């Protein structure tokens, strides 16, 4: 309390007095007609609670109709502070009779002085505010929460102002001079690296949109949604000394990992630990870790084969299945959450079943001794373990090539044979190694052979003809035969000699046409399906016919479909002239109701390779003219980046990827519409 202040008794103009809060009222002549915001009152209340009333209220006595004092005082200047104190009363921080320091003013017009207070003052520059907040944090060691409590704002607002206060002084002066907007300054605040901020500022073109500034500041960083960041996680990255840049002014979906090289190193180290565990547990000859799958490894791959589990495991498996079914039946109709012990029991039984199921397939011991494992980072941010690769130098030695002789034959195990595998005796031979002398059948009889080679060829030709006729009359068996032929060549090394149908499946390597295609979710799904079938195949291709013929019809169809699917080729090459093949591919896509929007989205990788006109047409088609006009004035790269964000989730596709809907899909939709209308 000031020494010259007095309690209210004799009222004189200019005196400082203390008036009970409940005796103060808003002056009807106050120039401010727009109410104070709740945030403003909150901030003033917090400031007064922390620092006291730094400014006096200006008041005049209230008088009744006859000019007599009512005992109340009208606040000409300081209405916001009066409301802040009333808020503190409501919170029971002070009493309603709290004495408030006021200055009596009976000489000036209340409307004029309340207007004067707001018109003649100059607000503090936001730049000054940002820097002062930063100084409070650095000089006094106050946290964002402490500063927030003293100024009546949220900790998030304080953090934003602290971040703005950390912008390069050079750029802060540019902002003071009016050459940067607040939105642009906020974009620069995404990093505290002054040199980087200034470098990006110097390199800006005429287009200084905030998103461009953010993009340029973070283009060497890794977004938190990147598979590397997902795999490592923020905790491990920061513990290794990494810094995560957070944008306090926009939704950054987890921020940006500043040091890409450090992140890659942590990824490799984590993959190496996983690889070491796999090698130690399974005994592979080698392991190799990669962030990206090494598609050009050039190695043959083997897969695990079905094996019989031990009697002990079989008993344990049946017991776990029985207990799981019983437990599921007990809780099937329960509306309450599972008790922790029941939930744990479910997890225990499922883990036991999964453990024993894992023993039903195994690699050959020889394959493990000679083979290796790739441990790579998958597209979903999880470790991907790919087993069973055999390096060329570790392959079993191939049999030596038979040696050719002067008559066009070759010597195998001491026996001379021609190109068709026929034994070549004495006499004359043509250029293909076929015997041209007479009496071939007689010689065979003299040698003790039941039939000559030429006669065997003659008879088996008739057998082939009969087989063609018979197989064409039995579609189900034809399906098994074709599936066997495809599977033998798809899943077995040297499987081309294990079938009797002259069908040769080929599968084009798509990675040579589209970079990164084999690291997509669709490629992984196809590989998983292939590995699943490979694991079910018998070890010996000689047993393949029995395996396939023993499958139920649905399984045969599924295996046939998988093998056939690997031969699909709808790639359009500029030098090829295959219009009928491309038309057939389009018909096939329609028949299977292919939805390319589920497998492909228009990213910058695509948008950066088409013209600006194509980009605008895509946005216009997907979102309308207004969206297209918003990006029409941008440069090509900026337009592509903006279009990627706009087109995300719209399902837009370029014409070459659009598939006609099958007639049955339209019929189903029409039927559903009719049913809904009937309801």
Image: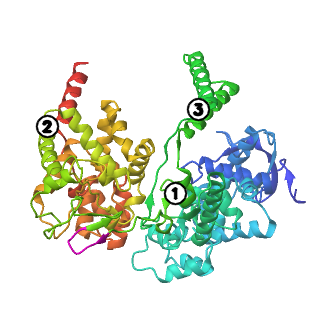
Name the front one of labels 2 and 3. Answer: 2
- 595 or 41: which is nearer to us? 595
Where residue 194 sits: x, y (%)?
61, 78
Q: Which residues are magenta?
A: 403-409
Residue at the location (12% across, 61% down)? Answer: 578
Where residue 191 sits: x, y (%)?
59, 70
- 283 or 640: which is nearer to us? 283
Q: Which residue is mark 2?
A: 472
Where residue 543 sits: x, y (%)?
38, 41
Q: CA distance from mark 2 to mark 3?
A: 45 Å
Q: Earlier in the sequence, mark 2 or mark 1?
A: 1
Q: Using the image, tell me which numbered label, if any, was put on residue 353.
A: 3
Give the overall secondary structure of the magenta segment. Answer: loop
- 240 or 540: which is nearer to us? 540
| Viewer can see residue 254 | no
Q: Which residue is mark 1?
A: 225
Where residue 542 sits: x, y (%)?
37, 44
Secondary element at tag 3: helix
Q: CA distance from mark 1 to mark 3?
A: 34 Å
Residue at the location (30% across, 31% down)? Answer: 553
């Amino acid at each position: 309390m000031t020494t010259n202040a007095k309690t209210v008794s004799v009222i004189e103009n200019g005196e400082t007095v203390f008036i009970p809060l409940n005796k103060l009222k808003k002056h009807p002549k106050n120039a401010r007609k727009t109410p104070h915001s709740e945030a403003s009152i909150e901030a003033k209340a917090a400031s007064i609670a922390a620092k006291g009333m730094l400014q006096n209220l200006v008041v005049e006595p209230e008088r009744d109709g006859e000019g007599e004092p009512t005992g109340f005082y009208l606040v000409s200047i300081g209405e916001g502070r009066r409301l802040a104190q009333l808020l503190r009363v409501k919170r029971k921080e002070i009493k309603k009779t709290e004495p408030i320091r006021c200055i009596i003013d009976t000489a000036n017009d209340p409307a004029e002085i309340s207007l004067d207070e707001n018109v003649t003052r100059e607000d503090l520059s936001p730049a000054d505010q940002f820097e002062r907040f930063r100084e409070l944090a650095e000089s006094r060691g106050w946290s964002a929460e402490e500063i927030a409590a003293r100024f009546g704002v949220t900790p998030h607002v304080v953090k934003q102002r602290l971040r703005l206060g950390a912008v390069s002084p050079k750029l802060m002066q540019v902002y003071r001079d009016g050459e940067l907007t607040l939105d642009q300054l906020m974009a620069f605040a995404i990093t505290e690296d002054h040199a980087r901020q200034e470098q990006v500022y110097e390199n800006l073109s005429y287009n200084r949109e905030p998103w461009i500034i953010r993009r340029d500041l973070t283009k060497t960083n890794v977004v938190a949604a990147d598979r590397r960041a997902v795999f490592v996680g923020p905790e491990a990255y920061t513990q290794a000394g990494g810094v995560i840049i957070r944008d306090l002014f926009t939704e950054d979906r987890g921020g940006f990992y500043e040091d890409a090289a450090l992140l890659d190193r942590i990824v490799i180290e984590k993959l190496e630990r996983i690889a070491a565990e796999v090698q130690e547990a399974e005994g592979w000859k080698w392991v190799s870790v990669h962030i990206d799958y090494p598609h050009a490894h050039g190695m043959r791959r083997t897969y695990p084969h079905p094996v019989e589990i031990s009697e002990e495991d079989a008993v344990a498996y049946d017991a776990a299945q029985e207990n799981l079914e019983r437990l599921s039946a007990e809780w099937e109709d329960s509306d309450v959450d599972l008790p922790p012990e029941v939930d744990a029991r479910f997890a225990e039984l499922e883990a036991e079943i999964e453990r024993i199921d894992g023993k039903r397939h195994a690699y050959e011991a020889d394959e493990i001794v000679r083979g290796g494992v790739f441990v790579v980072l998958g597209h979903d941010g999880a470790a991907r373990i790919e087993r069973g690769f055999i390096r060329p130098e570790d392959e079993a030695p191939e049999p030596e090539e038979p040696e050719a002789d002067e008559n066009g034959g070759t010597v195998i195990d001491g026996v001379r044979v021609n190109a068709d595998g026929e034994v070549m005796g004495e006499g004359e031979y043509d250029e293909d190694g076929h015997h041209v002398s007479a009496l071939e059948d007689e010689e065979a009889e003299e040698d003790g052979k039941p039939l000559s080679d030429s006669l065997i060829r003659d008879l088996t030709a008739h057998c082939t003809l009969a087989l063609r006729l018979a197989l064409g009359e039995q579609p189900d068996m034809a399906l098994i035969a074709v599936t066997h032929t495809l599977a033998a060549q798809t899943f077995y090394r040297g499987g081309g000699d294990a079938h009797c149908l002259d069908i040769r499946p080929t599968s084009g390597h798509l990675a040579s046409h589209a970079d990164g295609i084999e690291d997509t979710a669709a490629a992984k799904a196809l590989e998983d399906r292939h590995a699943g079938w490979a694991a079910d195949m018998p070890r010996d291709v000689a047993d393949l016919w029995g395996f396939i013929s023993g499958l139920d019809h649905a399984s045969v169809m599924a295996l046939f479909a998988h093998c056939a699917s690997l031969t699909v080729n709808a790639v359009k090459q500029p030098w090829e002239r295959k219009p009928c093949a491309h038309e057939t591919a389009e018909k096939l896509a329609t028949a299977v109701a292919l939805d390319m929007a589920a497998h492909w989205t228009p990213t910058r990788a695509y948008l950066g390779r088409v013209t600006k006109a194509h980009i605008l047409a895509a946005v216009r088609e997907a979102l309308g003219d207004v969206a297209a006009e918003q990006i029409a004035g941008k440069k090509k790269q900026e337009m592509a980046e903006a279009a990627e964000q706009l087109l995300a989730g719209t399902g837009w596709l370029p014409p070459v990827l659009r598939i006609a809907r099958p007639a049955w899909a339209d019929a189903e939709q029409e039927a559903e519409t009719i049913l809904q209308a009937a309801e």
